[in-house]
Image (cartoon, rainbow, N blue to C red):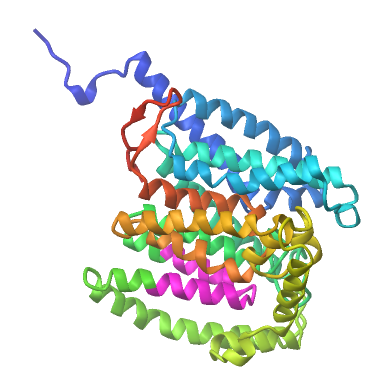
Amino acid sequence: MLTIPLSLAVPGPRELAAKALQWTTMAIALLLLVPMMSEAMPRLFEQGSLPFKPRDYKIGLSLIGLVLVIINRPAICLPALLLLLIPIIRLADAAILERFSVQSVMGDHANYVMSRASDLLVTIVGVGLLFTQHGYRIAVWVAVGTIFVVTGSTIYEWSGHAQWTAVPGRASGFLVDPNAPGIVLGLFLGIVLTLNKSFWWNVALIIVSWVGIALTLSRSGMIGLALIVVVYLIANLRKRGGALILIIAACAPLAIAGVAFLTASTERQGVVKDENATRRVQAIYELDFAKLWSGERAKDLSDGWEAVMKKPMLGHGTGSGTFWWQPHNEFVTLWVELGVAGPLLFFGLLMMLIIGVARSRFRGFYGIVPVLFYIPFSQVMIEWPSYWFAAAVVACVTSPKRYALGLRSSAALHHDA
């Protein structure tokens, strides 16, 4: 009797359908999450490069993504699901209570509510995709794609081909705020280092991220990246000692040349260069901590605390901490907006992640470093799907127990990254 080797057997309809579902889910995840988390769609639409509105694209693909998540029979991670509480509460506060109006900023408060609702939809889809069988692989490719898009757009703007930045003298890429690329790159680099086991690919992505952050002249971004890299190198010192020596030997002269190049380029009029940018370069690469400290941020933080003291129990409403006072601290922002319950809830969720990392023998440590580090440097991360996506990755890799939609206990997700 002639037998066909297993490796040569023709896949059956069920196997082909499973494969088609896997690749369709991956494609939708990349088409939705990478453009949304890198803010590519709004910038391309403003340039007239898109024939459709970003909001329609976001909502349409999000609904398709939700259907695919359900078809994939997700195994739910409760800690990751709990992270959605803060964006849900903020949306409900803005949409139902309307305690703070952002009409002067966005033209109409309804636009702000729609923005928060669509971002929450993207966040739910992103977290839901992590619950699928190939969720970790999706997370890695979304992170890699976002890293390249954010860095590429920053290089494109820095070289003078576009001007998206909100701060003269500094490139921002698609994200508009020059400090945002450093945070997003740090968050997604943490995802890659957590899930991807290929050392040399990780090193390559660290270099790509460094280029993207360096061109923005972000002080917090460079410090955060340095912290992530130091932690990663120390963890790999025993296994990769020789390779690390070669990397340091190769990168040291490149870093010196990069510093000299950035310093020189900030002194002439390129995209938009000024003396403030030159001082930033010197502060970052000379490790001048006096110059690294921003007096403007200290003033913003002080104003934020004054706002907290005016309404410490209930806060001023969603949007007041991101559009009006801008204290550059997520805890203070939540206190300004939601009252004392906001930072307490945020602290509880972070402690849940920290305890999970400790119990899993620091499995998600690379991911939680940027999730925690950038909290004192931003007031808008709590509005970003990218932040909750990165935090959800940490929750998933440190919480092995899963639940099916029928609330029956399910096996842990297969780590396919």
**Residue 187 placement (x, y as % from top left):** 52, 60
Direction from residue 359 to residue 165 in the image, left or right: right
Q: Is residue 124 above or below residue 101?
A: above
Task: Decide which of 345, 9 is in the foreground and name it.
Answer: 345
User: Where, by quadrant of the figure, is residue 305 drawn?
Assistant: bottom right
**Residue lying farthest left?**
1
Relative image position of residue 121 (x, y in whole percent): 65, 38
The picture quadrant where one finds residue 158 is bottom right
Residue 49 appears left or right of 133: right
- Disc count in the image? 0
The N terminus lies in quadrant: top left
Q: Is residue 140 visible?
A: no
- Of 103 and 132, the residue lying toward us: 103
Question: Does residue 358 show up magenta in the picture?
Answer: no
Q: What predominant SS class does the magenta segment belong to?
A: helix
Q: x, y (%) of residue 385?
A: 61, 49
184 and 41: which is toward the camera:
184
| Above or below for 168 versus 266 | above
Is 1 situated above or below 171? above
Magenta residues, as a range? Answer: 204-230
Residue in view at x 79 percent, y 61 percent:
323
The residue that appears at 60% across and 43% down in the rendered structure is 123
Farthest front residue in view: 313
* Relative image position of residue 222 (x, y in whole percent): 54, 75
> Does the rendering let one see residue 240?
yes
Identified at 30% across, 69% down, the residue is 235
Specify whether residue 229 is painted magenta.
yes
The residue closer to the viewer here, 181 or 396, is: 396
